[in-house]
Structure formats: structure tokens, C-alpha cells
Amino acid sequence: MKRIGFLSFGHWQPIPGSVARTADDALLQTIDLAVAAEELGIDGAFVRVHHFARQLSSPFPLLAAMGARTSRIELGTGVIDMRYENPLYMAEEAASADLISGGRLQLGVSRGSPETALKGYESFGYVPDEGETDADMARQHTALFRAAIDGAAVAVANPQMTGTTGGLAVQPQSPGLPDRIWWGSGTRATAVWTAEQGMNLMSSTLLTEDTGVPFGDLQAEQIALYRAAWKEAGWEREPRVSVSRSILPIVSDLDRKYFGASALGERTDQIGHLDGGIARFGKTYAGEPEQLVEELRDDAAVREADTVLVTVPNQLGVDYNAHLLETIVTQLAPALGWRD
């Protein structure tokens, strides 16, 4: 059975049509949507993390609140930009939120995407060492974070307080969390690296390379390389792989009002430039359920992934997005074989 989750970017803007007009709107509605999604049988509630923007930025208080209000649904990020993170403080926060949720966190991390602030991570106090890139720094932060949540000694004990000079791990620790870390990968090469590191694969909403093939085919190639590298590395557990898609089924007049133009327009991948190179973005799936079923069946990456994250238009509010997710669960998922 394929897992289905939602992914919210957590936008908030005081503009006409927006139900999420303030930061507290965005935060509280995300919690409420997680509750509604769990009631609908959705498997995961994921949030995007951005800084210096009117979007969700500090995931762990939010994940802890979502965990306290729910009992089954997976709770995750897609993704945390590790250039901005203090790895040891993040390890404490992640373990605490995971314990509150009963071990349901699925944390996507990565080097992150371009932000509204120029080198915003430097404002947070993190500057790459000479000869290193911000991507190198993100990987270093990730390595220390992963070691810390796995119980590694990361500080020397004060003998006056502890009676020993041994090493200390951060507290608390949450068993199983190290196996639930995902790397957001935007290229085939980083997918291979992700497998070598023993992390799950969160294939990016955009790929920073382009070979001329459709987005889904390029992602499917990325997934195949990842799984081959995972097998070669000899990891014992089975890895997980997620892809994200914008899926907007039209079954009501309100759906048609919001997304009818998208359904009538040409639906193709978008190709642009990002960070000095070519990037490929996936297309939007908007239309009648029968049409979307056929289109999604042809999406090679959706077929290969075990988890599909549906990006939701969060500014339309909890009720509308619960309606959207219910349509996907009841009309699309069974026809696609995602549900028995």
C-alpha cells in the first residue's frame, strides 16, 4: 500500500482569498489539518521550512503540537535547511518532538533551496570554513545531528558534577529516530550519496539537472540509482522513498472556480534556471478524477515511490484542503491501487 501524505508550505498573507492571513493562522491551521487528515486516513502530515519569509520556519514546536493532537499519522518535514541549524540543539528538539508523538517523526533534511535572504544562514551564525561550500556545511551539520540522535558522545563530562571524565550524549534520546531521517535530493548524484549515508530518499519538488526527459522519468532514474546504491552499501533495513506532487482533483464548482483554468491549460514540466544551472519542475495535476488517474499511472516516479506527498494550497484553509485530501483518498487512491 502506498502511503499518502500532505505537504504544506505554510504560506500566510493578508491578501484577498487567503484564509491564512497571519502567522498564527498558518500554524494553528496546520495542526488542525493534521487532525483532519488523520481522520480521513491520510498517512502523513509534512511541512516545508523556510526562513525570512511568510512561511513556516521553526518546525519542532509545530511538530510537537501536531503530535500531541494526533495519534497515528506520520509527522515530517520536507525539508529542514541544515545550513541554518545548530545540530545539537536540533537533536534535542527532534528527540523531544518525537517522544511527544510516540515515535512518528519522519524528518526530511537537506542543503535547502534558495532563500529570500542572501546567505541567510550567516545571519544565524553559520559560515562555511575557507575552501568549503554551504552545501559542505549542511552535510557536516547533518552528520553531527545524526550522530547526536544516535547517542554519540558529543561533550566531555564535568567531573565536579558527574564524577567522571567520560563523554556525554544529548538528552533526551528517542529510539528509532535515526532510521527516520530523509535527505532531500535534487540530483541523481546526491541520491546515490544519500543511499551511501543510510538515509531515506525524499526526491525534491524540483531537480537541479535536466536531461530532456519528463520530470517523473528523471526522478525514477534517481530512485533506481538510489536503490542500487543502497543495496550495494549493504544496509539491513528497507529504505523509504517519497516524491511530491501537486494534485488538484476537480469534483465541485468550488474546485472548478479555484483550479479550472489549470485543468484547461497545457500541463507540462517547467524548466528554468536555479543557482546558476538548469532546473526541472514537475507539472501540476489538475482535472477530473478519471483523467488524473490515467496521468498519474503514467508518472514513473509516482509508481516507484512508496510515499506520495500532495502539496496543498494551505491558504485556502483547513476545510477546503480536507475536502481535497478526501477526494484523493476516496476517488484517486483506490483506482490507482494505492489503497486496497
Image (tube, grey):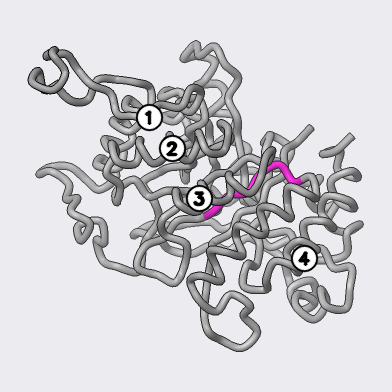
Is residue 20 placed above or below 63 in the rendered structure? below
Element type where label 4 sits in the image:
strand
Measured in 3D between alpha carbons, the distance from the residue under mark 1 to the one under mark 4, in whole angstroms, is 44 Å
Do tag 3 and tag 1 residues touch (Cβ < 8 Å)?
no
Measured in 3D between alpha carbons, the distance from the residue under mark 4 to the one under mark 2, in whole angstroms, is 39 Å
What residue would you read off at disc 1? 172
The answer to whether residue 242 is left or right of residue 260 is: left
Q: Residue furthest bottom?
A: 16
| Marked residue nearer the N-terminal end (3 or 1) | 1
| Marked residue nearer the N-terminal end (4 or 2) | 2
The amino acid pointed to by label 3 is Leu
The amino acid pointed to by label 4 is Ala
What residue would you read off at disc 4? 286
Quadrant, the C terminus: top right
Residue 207 image label: 3
- Give the residue displayed 48% in from the left and 28% down from the top: 177
The answer to whether residue 308 is left or right of residue 290 is: left
What residue would you read off at disc 2? 96
Disc 2 crowd rating (10 Å Cα; few below 14, some 14-19, many 20+) is many
Measured in 3D between alpha carbons, the distance from the residue under mark 2 to the one under mark 1, in whole angstroms, is 7 Å
The region drawn magenta spans 42-47
Viewer-side residue, 92 vs 109: 92
Is residue 328 placed above or below 107 in the rendered structure? below
- What is the quadrant of residue 173 in the picture? top left
The amino acid pointed to by label 2 is Ser
Is residue 143 placed above or below 34 in the rendered structure? above
The amino acid pointed to by label 1 is Pro
